[in-house]
Image (spheres, helix red, strand yellow):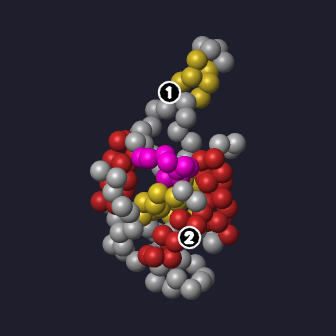
Amino acid sequence: MSTPEGAVVRTCLDYLQLRGILAWRNNTVGVYDQTAKRYRTNAGRNGIADILGCLPGGRFLAIECKAGKGHLSPAQIEFQHDIIEMGGLHIVARSVDDLIGRLYEVSMDGAGGHCTIRPGACIYKSEK
């Protein structure tokens, strides 16, 4: 991950691993087909967050990483709203500090240990 956005993804994943939060990079880029000499398009949903995971207690976690002045695409905004509507936690992070701050805001024990997220906590600012 050599892009500035890739660096944000990597540091967020490292932080989540240190906190013991199950999370993974969700790659949605098409795969290059050597035989056909072209990229196969992503067969999944558009707009899915860069990082997906599961918080202690079972709450779904989605983190969209942005660098600089990057903004959410319409598909990313739709995904954000769908996750929140279903009770999940969606975070837009421009740095690991954004991630830490958002998890702290919704944690019941913000001082330390594993982050316990209160059900129904809404921590996003809609870009709509």
The residue mark sitting in front, 1 or 2, is: 2
Q: Residue at x 63, y 47 (%)?
A: 4
Q: Residue at x 54, y 56 (%)?
A: 94
Q: Which residue is mark 2?
A: 100
Judge the density around disc 1: few (<14), some (14-19), many (≥20) Cα neighbours within 10 Å.
few
Whether 10 is among the magenta residues is no
Residue 16, can we see it?
yes
Left or right placement of residue 115 versus residue 74 in this view: right
Q: Residue at x 42, y 64 (%)?
A: 89
Determine the main secondary structure of the stretch shown in magenta: loop
Note whether 27 is above or below 20 in the view shown. above
User: Which label belongs to residue 41?
Assistant: 1
Q: What amino acid is at disc 1?
A: Thr
Residue 82, can we see it?
no
Residue 11: which quarter of the image? Answer: bottom right
Question: Which quadrant of the figure contains the N terminus?
Answer: top right
Note whether 101 is above or below 4 in the view shown. below
User: Which label belongs to residue 78?
Assistant: none
Helix, strand or loop status at disc 1 = loop
Q: Sequence-wise, which precedes: disc 1 or disc 2?
A: 1
Judge the density around disc 2: few (<14), some (14-19), many (≥20) Cα neighbours within 10 Å.
some
Residue 85 or 95: which is nearer the viewer? Answer: 95
Residue 3 or 60: which is nearer the viewer? Answer: 3
Q: What amino acid is at disc 2?
A: Ile
Residue 108 location (% of width, % of height)? 46, 83
Residue 15: which quarter of the image? Answer: bottom right
Residue 13 location (% of width, % of height)? 63, 59
Helix, strand or loop status at disc 2 = helix
Q: Which residue is most to the front? A: 69
Question: What's drawn in magenta, residue-wise?
Answer: 62-72
Residue 49 location (% of width, % of height)? 48, 49
